[in-house]
Image (tube, grey):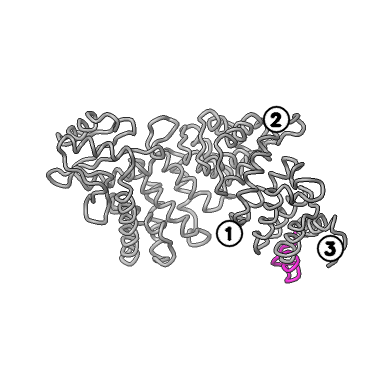
Amino acid sequence: MVMRARLDVACRNWAGVLYGLAKVGVKCSDTAHVKRVFHICMEQDLPGLLLEGQKCEPQSVSNVAIACVDAEYGGSMQPFISAVAMRLGEPSMGGVGGRMMERAKPQEWSNLLYACAKLEQRGIRAGGGMGIITEVGAVAMAGALQKPVRDQPKPQELANTLWGLSYFDWYDASIITVLAHAVVERMDGSIPQNISNTLLALAKLEWYDEGAVSKLAAAMVECIDSSTPQAISITLWALSTLGWYDPSVYDALLRALLDKSDQAVPQQLSNAIYSCAVASHGGSAVDELAQGISRQDVGEGWKAQDVSNTLYAWAVLGSIGIVSDSLSTMAQHLMGEVNVRGPDAFQTLALRQLYLAHLEAEQVGLPGGGLSNGMLQVATEQHTQGQAELRKKEKQSGGTAGVQQAAAALQEAGYEVELGGWVGLQGDFFAELLVRHTGCGIAVDVLSGADVFCHPTGQLSGKVRQRHTQIRQRCDGLVVLSEGAVKQSGLVVQKVEEVISGGTAAV
């Protein structure tokens, strides 16, 4: 093959061909010839050259990955990724010039990790070799922060690295902390996409530092005029997932999204109102968002998951007392579309969300009603199956440490306690603990870290509040306990007895 005429530059030549094609807008879908060129390179020739130990510069490695993204390559990445991982993991495979990627610049590592994550996002799996690449790449990026300023990663490179790492099964708290704080320190003048991508990565990695997240949120508000609907929507989703809430920040983000609503796609509108539901955020901006959704032709462009997420958000908002005519009109609009599409249009998670929306529609008497008979039957079956699976998991695990402590305290006080007891009709909802009592019993819920917002401290997630509303409607009372409260056995018993006496309890 021509590419192998000079082995010392074969990898660079392949990278040049693919990158050149991609940069002039050529796609793999354009012609069978282009598709075959990418296939031969990515699945045969380039992996072979790498495994032979032939020279391959860091820029060539990252350019090949970027080219696959831009040219919408749909074949396998695993031969290439495995070969790169082998070269990184085996010093003897360094080839000409020493260990491959040893002298890679931050931009080259950032591009490689970002491109692999973009392909993963599209369903193009990187394979097991990605574990080595993420490990070496993350360490290299953190190490580059100790170099002279001119050689340190730029904010976009750090943001893209964190975003890339969040797509793979890799986590090192110390390195993530170093990279995250580096982004915050360098974010002056950062573009909104860098901030939103950083927040998205931190949310997916489940990494939280109040100071860092607060600074990123404030920075996003400062550059909000130049933000895209995508960056705003991602920021709202990430902040709500991280458990960070400030009403002024959420309102500013929503107002900016509304100003650019003609550029927004349905998923961005859906994610925004979903994030508000998780954060228990209401107000005029939420109402205006609902009005905007009501004006949309949801039969065109709205995916089933966007529709179900939005209706679920409405159900959560309603269950915690955030109601308005605008939200009701939006729910009617979407519920009608759900019934037109029928159950086959929705996946399992969506059907379970729609069941909860139907319960809210029944509770408030939504004009036009909830799910039609056929939709309701399938959604009910999926909800019941989901609750049964969660209850089985709860019983098999014996519950969290907090649940076990609460159960022990109540049993010692003479109460009969059931782990994962049904409340209401069997298969409807279950409580982590159910204290047997005259009637339906007293439900006990022990909060986990994910149930409570970090900022402000103690605010419950809207999803948890919605679950509590459903449980409370189906039993004689609900006791909500923090992880700290269950360590005080006397307090656990006291709160249950308060509810039995006709009070409410949440500590």
Q: How many residues crowd around disc 1 within 10 Å: few (fewer than 14), some, or many (20 or more)?
A: few
Q: CA distance from mark 2 to mark 3?
A: 39 Å
For disc 3, the marked residue is 4
CB under 8 Å between callouts 2 and 1?
A: no
* Residue found 39% across the figure and 53% down from its top: 331
- In the image, the segment drawn in magenta is 25-38
* Residue found 45% across the figure and 48% down from its top: 291
In the rendered image of this protein, does residue 183 appear above or below residue 42? Answer: above
Q: CA distance from mark 3 to mark 1?
A: 31 Å
Q: Is residue 437 left or right of residue 180?
A: left
> Which label was assigned to residue 413?
none
For disc 2, the marked residue is 146
- At label 3, the amino acid type is Arg
Upstream in sequence: badge 2 or badge 1: 1
Residue 478 sits in which quadrant? top left
Q: Secondary structure at mark 2?
A: loop
Furthest toward the bottom, the residue is 32
Q: How many residues crowd around disc 2 within 10 Å: few (fewer than 14), some, or many (20 or more)?
A: few
Q: Is residue 212 visible?
A: yes
In the rendered image of this protein, does residue 7 appear above or below residue 103? Answer: below
For disc 1, the marked residue is 123
- At label 2, the amino acid type is Gln
* Residue found 38% across the figure and 41% down from its top: 462
Question: Which of the two marks, 3 or 1, is nearer to us in this view?
Answer: 3
Q: Quadrant of the N terminus?
A: bottom right
Q: Nearer the viewer, residue 295 or 381?
A: 381
- At label 1, the amino acid type is Gly
Q: Is residue 500 left or right of residue 392?
A: left
